[in-house]
Image (spheres, rainbow, N blue to C red):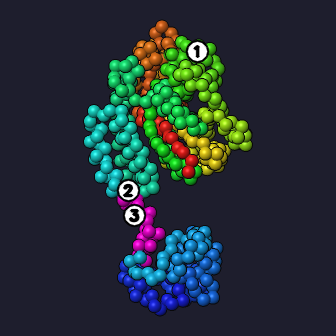
Amino acid sequence: MILWADDEIELLKPHILFLEEKGYGVSTANSGDVAIEMAKSEKFDIVFLDENMPGLSGLETLTKIKAIHPVTPVIMITKSEEEHLMDDAIGSKIADYLIKPVNPNQILLALKKNLENKRLVNQKNTIGYQQEFRSIGLSLTENLKQAEWIEIYKKLVSWELKLDETNDPGMMDIFKMQKTEANLLFGKFIEANYIGWLNGKIQEPPLLSNTLFKKRIYPLLESGDKYMVIVVDNLRFDQWKVLEPLISETYRVVQEEVYFSILPSATQYARNALFAGLMPSQIEKQYPQWWLNDEDDGGKNRFEEELLDAQLKRWNKPVKFSFNKVTNLGAGKKLSENLSNITNNQLNFLVYNFVDMLSHARTEMEIIRELADDESAYRSITKSWFLHSPLQDIIKQLASKKIKLIITTDHGTIKVTEPTKVVGDKNVNTNLRYKNGKSMDFNKKDVFLVKNPEDAFLPRQHLSSSYLFAKNDLFFAYPNNYNHYVSYYRNTFQHGGISMEELLIPFITLEPR
């Protein structure tokens, strides 16, 4: 039902008849006072409001109607194009405005835009994905290269975000089936190519954790501009896409890239490789004082700043830099309050651990499981966190100081759904997506086995050590207390294995607006 308020409402009779022929019900008012009384007694889907009425003006009527029905869309109709009137109206949260004289098609378009927009967008998204489904499926049958896999993943993320809006369970089920198929084939692609990339047997390997600084960050320093590199631990590409509109309020995206995390796609390995510019076995060999293996006690990422400093010196980059790590709200607030103390450096690094903490909290806390019970909710809670986090304030401050920004991560995470059994001795690590140990028994079709750790530039803890990487959305489970273990970890977000979500991760270059 439409409420249309205009002191010359009789002159609009042809417009009203046109809308009624289109199936809309229209109630009319010839003043702001009458419109307000009607709004008190009836709930309207939308209100058309003349800006220049005698008595209560359109803006005054708008304010009173919004006080009664805050979410009802109001379209202002005005003879004037004066900027201050439009600013006042928009500031009062109008849904749209039209300039007189209006024709029936303008009115109809405004109605569809404001009343049927969601249905039309959902319909377009559903039809669009149905058309794209076949195209993506055909692409998956081809012998895809790394750049093509990145494009496939970007397409899937784009459609997943669009389908979130449709709330169509059937279409989302079809999408999940296609993403599962893509991940199965991606696992085979990694299994066939990963060792070759690392050992120079395949030309032009992709951008990897250990080569990211050399190939992307160091060239930017030639300009002399100041940069802040923010490493948000565990940030998936889809999570970046939901944060992008918020960050774009103060920063413009210069380049959006996706690079490959090394294996294991776990913080201990991937982030140390990122800051060292070396693969894990190279770190262990060159800097044994800064490397701890899986079975060693102690924090495995305590020496990132030292590894970074060593990398800068190794590549002859005498750049003064700062390094900060935020693992809780207090540390984030403190850094935000003291940001000016570090931003005189040309290069600044900030490791922000929230997304990693979220994934672990979701495993361990029932309330977080309920808040983030699926992929869409997981993205939503990430967005909500950012809106209320010190990180948003830090980024705004950086923009005001005209400091350029890089946002990236060390690895992603995947929602695991099905267990695969593994048996090993007590020294096998506890990660659910990769195993490192000796004498392990496992289902060969479920894993990528690296029998010789040296082939993957991984430390060898024992003479017979090997590495297992879970593929797709599987997670490792021991036979002991199997049912409880599976129930506890199923549908949690984990990392360390092989999936597009874990390995294909964002590297974003931005400049202040």
Mark sitting earlier along the chain (1/2): 2
Q: Judge by depth and name the residue closer to the eye, 121 or 197.
A: 197
Please say if 59 is above or below 115: below
| Predominant secondary structure, magenta span | helix
Q: In x, y percent, where is residue 38?
A: 57, 83
- Mark 3 residue element: helix
Which residue is identified by label 2? 125
Q: Nearer the viewer, mark 3 or mark 1?
A: 1
The mark found on residue 426 in the picture is: none
Residue drawn at x 44%, y 21% as measured from the top left: 468
Residue drawn at x 57%, y 35% as measured from the top left: 224
Residue drawn at x 51%, y 90% as measured from the top left: 8
Which residue is identified by label 3? 120
Which residue is identified by label 1? 287
Residue drawn at x 38%, y 45% as measured from the top left: 155
Please say if 39 is above or below 351: below
Q: Judge by depth and name the residue closer to the eye, 233 or 511.
A: 511
Q: In x, y percent, where is residue 140?
A: 30, 38
Q: Nearer the viewer, mark 1 or mark 2?
A: 1
- Mark 1 residue element: loop
- Mark 2 residue element: helix
Q: In x, y percent, where is residue 378?
A: 53, 45
Give the Cα separation between the discs numbered 1 and 2. Answer: 52 Å
What residue occupies the far front of the structure in this picture? 223
Q: Does residue 345 appear anywhere in the picture? A: yes
Q: Amino acid at mark 3?
A: Leu
Q: Does residue 374 appear anywhere in the picture? A: no
Circle 1 packing at 10 Å, graded few (<14), some (14-19), many (20+), is: some
Q: Amino acid at mark 1?
A: Tyr
What residue occupies the far bottom of the structure in this picture? 10
Specify the segment rendered in magenta: 107-124
